[in-house]
Amino acid sequence: MPVFPAPDTPHPITLPDGSLHRDTVFLRAVIDHPRWVIGDYTYASSENPPADWAHELAPYLYAFSPDRLIIGKFCQIADGVRFITALANHRYDGFSSYPFAIFHRAFEGAPSLPGPGKDTIIGNDVWIGQGARILPGARIGDGVIIGAGAVVGGHVAPYQVVIGNPGRVLRGRFAPEVVARSLELRWWEWPIAQILAHEAEICGADLAALERAGGECGSD
């Protein structure tokens, strides 16, 4: 069975010459931030790896932010992705959207600032393509694929393919009954040894095979 890097490995890819591929990181290993929640084996890649991955990916998520960025397990985040979290917002229900309070610093009850925003939640096994933007408070379901350059907000149901600006569902990846059963099996919760043993079933599209694998893993 192949050896898989631990989820706290900063650079989990080793190149043929034995050196580490520093363009890709397991995020849990490189982000220590009170408003981030990151699942095991979720990775991000960058053509110009930043010193501060948290700031690069979510530049408006501060230690004092009221909202959180929650990302599940086994997510795949391509180069140039940004999570635009709640503190990037301005009020837009009045005559001006100008954020006076960030300059005069009297924040308590400041009428020029919006109220606290919602958490941004990304499910498990979500693939976010190059340059995509995830808007404040988005809820992205398990198994979603977000196309390159898409701008996505609101709620996206599991196993949808989303493209464009504004983001729209292009299609579902599977029939509804297959999605429902996949969500019951929750392969991403299996022990990593079992996941590797059933890589073919997880990466295939044969529900019966995945169910058999799930039975072996006690998730039936």
Image (cartoon, rainbow, N blue to C red):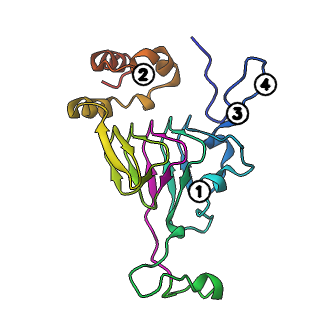
**Rendered image: mark on residue 203:** 2
The residues tagged by marks 3 and 1 sit, at their Cα atoms, a distance apart of 20 Å
Q: Secondary structure at mark 2?
A: helix
Relative to residue 72, is residue 184 depicted above or below? above
The residues tagged by marks 2 and 3 sit, at their Cα atoms, a distance apart of 23 Å
Q: Position of residue 83 (x, y in %)?
A: 53, 55
The residues tagged by marks 2 and 1 sit, at their Cα atoms, a distance apart of 29 Å
Which mark is nearer the camera, 3 or 4? 4
> From the image, which quarter does the C terminus lie in?
top left
Q: What residue appears at the point 44 percent right and 42 percent down from the top-left corner?
A: 147
Tags 4 and 1 touching, CB below 8 Å:
no
Q: Position of residue 54 (x, y in %)?
A: 64, 53
> From the image, which quarter does the N terminus lie in?
top right
Q: Residues within 10 Å of mark 4 (few under 14, many from 20)?
A: few
Which stretch did the figure color magenta? 113-134
Tags 2 and 1 touching, CB below 8 Å:
no
In primary-sequence order, the first of circles 2 and 3 is 3
Circle 3 sits on which residue? 11
Amino acid tagged 3: His
Amino acid tagged 4: Ser
In primary-sequence order, the first of circles 3 and 4 is 3
Which mark is nearer the camera, 3 or 1? 1
The residues tagged by marks 3 and 4 sit, at their Cα atoms, a distance apart of 10 Å
Relative to residue 67, is residue 111 depicted above or below? below
In primary-sequence order, the first of circles 4 and 1 is 4
Q: Nearer the viewer, residue 202 or 186?
A: 202
Q: Secondary structure at mark 4?
A: loop
Circle 4 sits on which residue? 19
**Rendered image: mark on residue 27:** none
Circle 1 sits on which residue? 58
Amino acid tagged 1: Ala
